[in-house]
Image: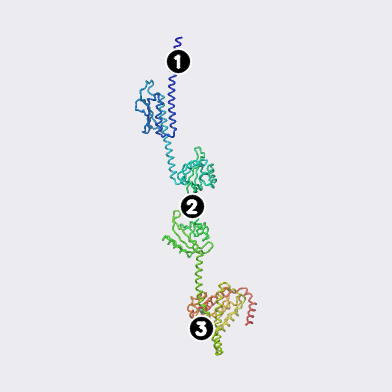
Amino acid sequence: MKIKEKMTRKMSAAVTVERDSIETALDKRVRELRCLYDIASITGTTRLTLPQRFQEIVNLLPRAFQYPDCTCARITLHGDEFKTRNYRDTDRKISANITVQGAKTGTVEIGYTGTLPALKNGLFSKEERLLMDAVAERLGAITEHRHSEQRIKEERDKTRRYLDLAGVIFIAMDAKGCVTLINRKGCQVLGYEEKEIIGRDWFDNFIPERLRDSVKQISQKLLAGVEEGNELFENPVLTKNGEERVIAWHNTILRDDAGNIMGHFSSGEDITDQKQSQELFQTISHNSPLGIYILQDDKLQYTNPQLQKITGYSPQEMAGRDLLSLVSLEDRDVVKSNTVFTLREESPYPCEYRILNKNGQIKWVMQTVSPIHYLGREAILGNLMDITERKYLERKVIEYEVLNKMKSDLLAMVSHELRTPLATIKGYSTLILDYYSRLDSEETKDYLKSIDISTDRLAKLVDNLLDTSRMEAGLLKLEKSPVSMTQLIKGVATEASIRADQYHIVAKFSRRLPMVNVDAKRIRQVLDNLIDNAIKYSPPSTEITISADISAHELLVSVSDQGPGIPVEELTNIFDRMYRIEQRLYSGADGIGLGLYICQRLVESHGGRIWAENVPDRGSIFKFTLPLTSKIKRKKGRRGIAAELLNRKAR
Ligand code: ADP
């Protein structure tokens, strides 16, 4: 029994020892595991820097060893040293290498500093050595991870700096439309600080209300993958002070590693100023009363609506055209030389020229040109003012001035021409009245004849003046009827012979003349005028011949005299209104230069022509034509003969 008791006691003592050693071993493992756990916790802490982490790790290492109170630790990494306060260099230590990407970058060491109880299995247990290796490996991993983190951070900072430096807006938003990133330019444009933007709904806060839905739709299409976002969108954003800025956006979809759409990234350019200047240019150019063009390489590159109005051509019709092709032929050289001169002198020198517009109308324009740069190359900017109206008025003013001068000339001439016969009439009538009883009948007859001639002269003058103003007012009406020109000419010649019996006035016909459809009174007036001129400008006793002939379509009448003739250079002028040949102005022949003018208007209104020919030393011939209509020619047989008979009877 005693033996059994002894045995039992022995066995229980052995069990106790065994249990103690197991507990000790377990305690060690727990400490080792705690050490590794703590290292892992420190590694996951973001609030610590890498040196701080190493310092914390080095401080907790002794606790994992058998005799923590006399254990010291040191980590050496990249020349940096992290050690426990009690660290001392000792022989009683173990160390393990820290490697990063296969290269030794440092060591971790554990050493004993005080007196230790006798150790059976050496200074450090196998587990402790393994722990050292595990710690060294962890430290290597921390360093490596930290380096990668550092690199990522550096890359991110670099990207951020780039984004901030860029002159464009960068903005990223998640699938809900909340801003996750915005660069400095974006903040500047919006007038907010970054923290005021990040996390806020982009559409609700930064897009003007009226456009919110449409802009959201674009974003939703992108997020739904309907559109890839290569297109450029323009939309205004709302700034902090309520102003709107127009941004041209380029959107890109953001996807995660699995390819799922996470949001979108947009780059935007603030084009407000560009838009404003564009709008300003459009407003000025579209509303300018000036025609504006840009000419490059001799081709029209731009034309504004006013120029299109002046020329009548659309922008498409004008694009690429040479400006000179619109300029009237006569003015092309002027325009060319003016442009060259102005560009060389660099001072706008206005040039007036004519444009032939699309409808074939002439438009007067006043142009200035200046050298410019357009699309990076030399060009010409031209401004045109439509001065057609002004030119018309200028012409009117000139005409008015001429008319005014003519009016005063006419007045001077008319008053002279009126006064002369009036003075004669007044003088002789007073003479007759005062000396009636003393005058013999011959004298009285002479005076009365002078009064009669002057009255005729006066009447003719007044008639001419009235006719002229009537013609110019367009009030002259012709009363045409079939007339026998033979009869008419003969009658005129006979009357002229009575009026001017000192002249031999003869009518000559080479053949029978057909009837003509004319206003007899007016054609008689033409003939009277021509015969009176012949009488007026030829010396007495000379012959004045009136002749008539027919050609294919017309009747040709001529009045020739044996007067001084008409200088060649004056042959056409004499038909102008109030034109008198200078040298004859003082010859004593009366007249105001309206006779031939009236003749011309009368003949032309009948569809005929009138002209003068000069026969040197033999006088002048005045000729006019009258058209022969087929209708009359056909009827001539009966009605012509009847009219002739009637005329003969009347005589
Ligand atoms: P007026 O006889 O009143 O001067 P007209 O119009 O009849 O005006 O004639 C214009 C001018 O033409 C005259 O001033 C005269 O110089 C010239 N002329 C006209 N007829 C003749 C003619 N038969 N012979 C020479 N000169 C003439």
Which of 517/9 is in front?
Answer: 9
Q: Nearer the viewer, mark 1 or mark 3?
A: 1
Q: Is residue 495 visible?
A: yes
Which of 642/164 is in front?
Answer: 164
Badge 3: how crowded within 10 Å, few (<14), some, or many (20+)?
some
Residue 12: mark in rendering: 1
Residues at circles 2 and 3 in contact by the CB criterion of under 8 Å: no
Report the amino acid beneath label 1. Ser
Residues at circles 1 and 3 in contact by the CB criterion of under 8 Å: no
Find disc 3 in the rendering and name its residue. 539
Coloring applied to the structure? rainbow
Q: Sequence order check: which comes first, mark 2 or mark 3?
A: 2
Quarter of the rendering containing residue 55: top left
Q: Sequence order check: which comes first, mark 1 or mark 2?
A: 1
Report the amino acid beneath label 3. Pro
Residue 276: mark in rendering: 2
Q: Nearer the viewer, mark 2 or mark 3?
A: 2
Which of 648/521 is in front?
Answer: 521
Is residue 11 placed above or below 624 in the rendered structure? above
Residues at circles 1 and 2 in contact by the CB criterion of under 8 Å: no
Which of 373/506 is in front?
Answer: 373
Label 1, label 3: how far apart the Cα atoms are: 186 Å
Report the amino acid beneath label 2. Gln
Label 2, label 3: how far apart the Cα atoms are: 87 Å
- Callout 3: CB less than 8 Å from ligand 1: no
